[in-house]
Image (tube, helix red, strand yellow):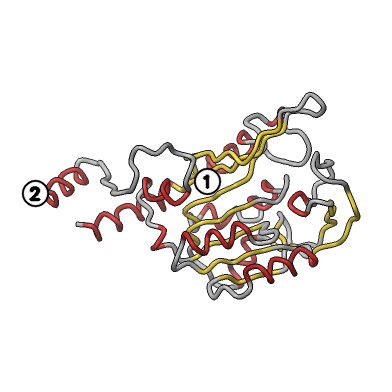
């Protein structure tokens, strides 16, 4: 009877998903939210961590996605050395001392006392003090994926301190061809006028991604700074999904569950 019911729902245009903790709110667990969207973390095969820093997110993804190959990118040599120490021995994590932009060209990187805010953007970060500026190698997402003949990517996480839109522009052909199912992108505000320091807004991200078939799905708040001594500062990650890729994946998951 259950199998018949699920078949009827699918024919009527409804998707049937099984997931844990149905009462939990969205925006708390990436793993749970992906399951709710019909995407099983255990089926994930390829993940890119662009702006991996010292590897905290890559190490977490290595646990959440048990079968995925994770490519972690960090262009600053000193930070990359720490990244390799932290995740280099994980069998499914590949580390690359490389950055991404809208063009394959080396760029000046501003190095701060807090490595997580290192940025190629000229706007001064509100966190940490500027130490020096170095030149780092950059390529485009389209060029790198084509060079390695990678056709499908399940998830790309982008955290590059204000350079997110340039990374997306460098992958426009990849996104146009719906080769990426999910994007997890750091943003600073909803409106572009509210961005303080290096960062992008949801307004900018949605304007670029929506014509390519990607829609905002979930927001994950990272931190909020409320202080009378400094401007309001927030940081969150936005999960976008490609509607075509998600529909195909959900149909596959549904077929496997029947």
User: Where in the figure is residue 196, as x and y percent of width and height?
Assistant: 76, 33
Disc tally is: 2
In this view of the protein, which residue sits in the foreground, 244 or 201? 201
Residue located at (69% from left, 71% from top):
85
Q: Nearer the viewer, residue 206 or 174?
A: 206
Left or right of 241? Residue 43 is left
Q: Which of 256/175 is in front?
A: 256
Q: Which residue is mark 1?
A: 212
Mark in the foreground, 1 or 2: 2
Left or right side of 135 for 183:
left
Camera-nearest residue between 207 and 14: 14
Instruction: Say whether disc 1 or disc 2 marks the residue closer to the N-terminus.
Output: 2
The structure residue drawn at horizontal position 52% and vertical position 46%, both measured from the top left corner, is 212
Q: Residue at x 33, y 48 (%)?
A: 20
Residue at 79% x, 24% y is 228
Residue 188: % across, % down:
67, 37
Q: Residue furthest right?
A: 132
Q: Position of residue 185 (x, y in %)?
A: 60, 47
User: Circle 2: is it few (<14), some (14-19), or many (20+) Cα within 10 Å?
Assistant: few
User: In the current view of this chain or complex, which residue is farthest to the top?
Assistant: 228
As drawn, the residue found furthest toward the left would be 1
Residue behind mark 2 = 1
Is 258 situated above or below 221?
A: below
- Quadrant where the C terminus lies? bottom left
Quick one: SS at disc 1? Answer: helix
Image quarter of residue 78: bottom right
Q: Which mark is residue 6?
A: none
Residue 80, x across and y down, in percent = 74, 66
């Amino acid at each position: 009877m259950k199998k018949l019911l699920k078949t009827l729902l699918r024919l009527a245009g409804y998707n049937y998903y099984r997931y844990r903790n149905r009462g939990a709110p969205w925006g708390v667990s990436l793993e749970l939210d992906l399951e709710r969207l019909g995407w099983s973390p255990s089926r994930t095969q390829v993940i890119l961590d662009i702006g991996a820093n010292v590897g905290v997110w890559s190490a977490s993804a290595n646990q959440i996605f048990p079968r995925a190959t994770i490519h972690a990118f960090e262009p600053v040599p000193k930070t990359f050395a720490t990244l390799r120490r932290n995740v280099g021995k994980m069998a499914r994590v590949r580390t690359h001392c490389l950055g991404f932009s809208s063009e394959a060209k080396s760029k000046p990187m501003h190095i701060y006392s807090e490595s997580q805010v290192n940025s190629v953007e000229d706007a001064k970060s509100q966190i940490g003090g500027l130490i020096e500026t170095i030149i780092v190698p950059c390529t485009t997402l389209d060029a790198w994926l084509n060079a390695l003949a990678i056709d499908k990517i399940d998830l790309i996480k982008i955290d590059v301190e204000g350079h997110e839109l340039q990374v997306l522009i460098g992958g426009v052909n990849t996104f146009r061809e719906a080769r990426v199912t999910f994007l997890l992108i750091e943003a600073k505000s909803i409106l572009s006028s509210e961005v303080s320091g290096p960062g992008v807004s949801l307004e900018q991200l949605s304007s670029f991604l929506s014509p390519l078939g990607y829609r905002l799905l979930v927001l994950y708040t990272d931190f909020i700074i409320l202080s009378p001594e400094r401007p309001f500062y927030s940081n969150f990650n936005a999960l976008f999904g490609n509607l075509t890729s998600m529909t195909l994946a959900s149909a596959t998951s549904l077929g496997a569950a029947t």
